Image (tube, helix red, strand yellow):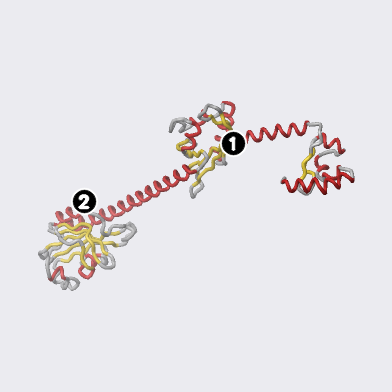
Amino acid sequence: MRDLNVLDSPIDPAYDDLARIAALVCQTPIALVSFVDEARQWFKSAIGFGASETPLNQSICAHVLTQDDLLVIPDLTADPRTAGNRLVTEEPRIRFYAGAVIRSGAGIPLGSLCVIDREVRPAGLTAAQGATLQALARQLSSLLEHRRSLDRIAQRESELAASERRFRVMTAAMPQMVWTTRPDGYHDYYNDRWYEFTGVPYGSTDGEAWNGMFHADDQERAWARWRHSLATGEPYEVEYRLRHHTGIYRWTLGRAMPIRDAEGRIERWFGTCTDIEELKQAEAEARKLAAVVETSKDFIGLTDEAGHVVHLNEAALRLVGLPDLAAARATLISDYFTPESRRLVEAVVLPSVRRSGW
C-alpha cells in the first residue's frame, strides 16, 4: 500500500466513476472503493456513504481479502462474521454487502470494490451483476498500476530535471567551455563560457555548425578525429584554432568522453574546449630559444643542482670532445675545468647558484 501511495490520496474522479457504475449495475445506494492497511480501511471513493474511513475491526471489506474474488453476504445480521459489526447494529445499519477483490499487479489483495444496501437481499446479486462487479474491480486494479506508473514517470522526470539543474550549475562554474552531444554526435548544449569566448548567438552552433568556428586548415582534421570517436567510442582529443569573438583564432584543446549506460551503450558525449593559446606561444618561444642555444657557437650547458650535466649544445660537445648528449650526461660540469678552476666552481660558483635558486 505504501508503494502504491494511494492511502489518504486526493479525490480521483476515475475511482468515483467506477464506484457509481457498480452502484448503478447492482442497484444499491452505496458503493465503496476500499483499501485496507494494518489499522483501518480507507475509502478512495465513497458513494452514498458519509465516512472516509473506519477502524479495521469494523471493516467488512477485510473479509473479502480472504476470498478468491467475490464475497456476497445477503443478510449481514445473520452472518456470524458481521452480525456484531457496529455498522450493522448502529447507524447506518447496513444489511447487504457484496465485494470484489482489488489486487496489485503482483496479485496481492489490497482492498475491494463493494456495494451495500440497507435492505436484506436474499437473492444477493445476479450472475451478470457479480461478473460486472468483478470486472470493475479489475479495472480498479489496472487504474492503480497505471497511476503508479505515472507517479514513477513523474518521479523520474523530477530526478532528471534536478540532475539537469545540477549539471548546468556545475558547468557554469567551470572555466572551460563545456558541450554535450547526443549519441550520434549532434551538439545540443554549450555552457556560457562557449558563448562568451566565441561571441556567437545562443543555439547557433547546435548540431554540426560548430565546425565552422574552426580555422579552415583545422576543420577536416578535427572532423576526421570526431567521426572516428563516434564510430569507435574512443575518447576524442584534438588541438585546433578556434575563432575568438575578437575575430582572431586561438589555439584550443578539444576533448570528449562517452557517457555509457549499464549495458555499455553510449547515451551522450561530454566534452570540453580549453584555451591553450598562451601555452602554444610559450612552446613556440621555447622552440626559438632551443634553436638559438643549439646554433650558438658558444659553450652552453645545463646542469642539475649537484652539478651533473643535463644538456650541452653542439658547440659545447665539440669543445669538450664528447660524441653525443648521452656521453655528456655521464659527466659533471666541473670535469670540464682545470683543477684550479674546478675548485673555484665547486667552492664558489655552485654554492652561489644553489643559494640563488635553480
Task: Locate residue 7 relative to residue 227 in the image: left or right.
Answer: left
164 or 105: nearer the viewer: 164
* Residue at (30, 52) in percent of width and height: 147
Image quarter in which the C terminus is found: top right
> Crowding near pointer 1: few (<14 within 10 Å), some, many (20+)?
some
Q: Position of residue 215 (x, y in %)?
A: 56, 27
Q: Residues within 10 Å of mark 2 (few under 14, many from 20)?
A: few
Determine the residue positioned at 48% across, 42% down.
268
Amino acid type of the residue tagged 1 in the rendering: Ile
Where residue 206 sits: x, y (%)? 46, 33
Question: Amino acid under label 2?
Answer: Pro
Quadrant location, the N terminus: bottom left
Numbered disc 1: secondary structure: loop
Q: How many tags in the picture?
A: 2
Mark 2 vs mark 1: give the one in front.
1
Residue bearing the label numbered 1: 276
Secondary structure state at the residue bearing disc 2: helix
Q: Are marks 2 and 1 in contact (CB under 8 Å)?
A: no
- Residue ranking furthest to the right: 339
Residue 318: image x %, image y %?
85, 35
Marks 2 and 1, how far apart at CA: 62 Å
Measured along the vertical axis of the image, is residue 357 above or below residue 22? above
In percent of width and height, residue 3 lies at: 34, 59
Q: Nearer the viewer, residue 37 or 65?
A: 37
Using the image, tell me which numbered label, if any, was put on residue 13: 2
The image quadrant of residue 310 is top right
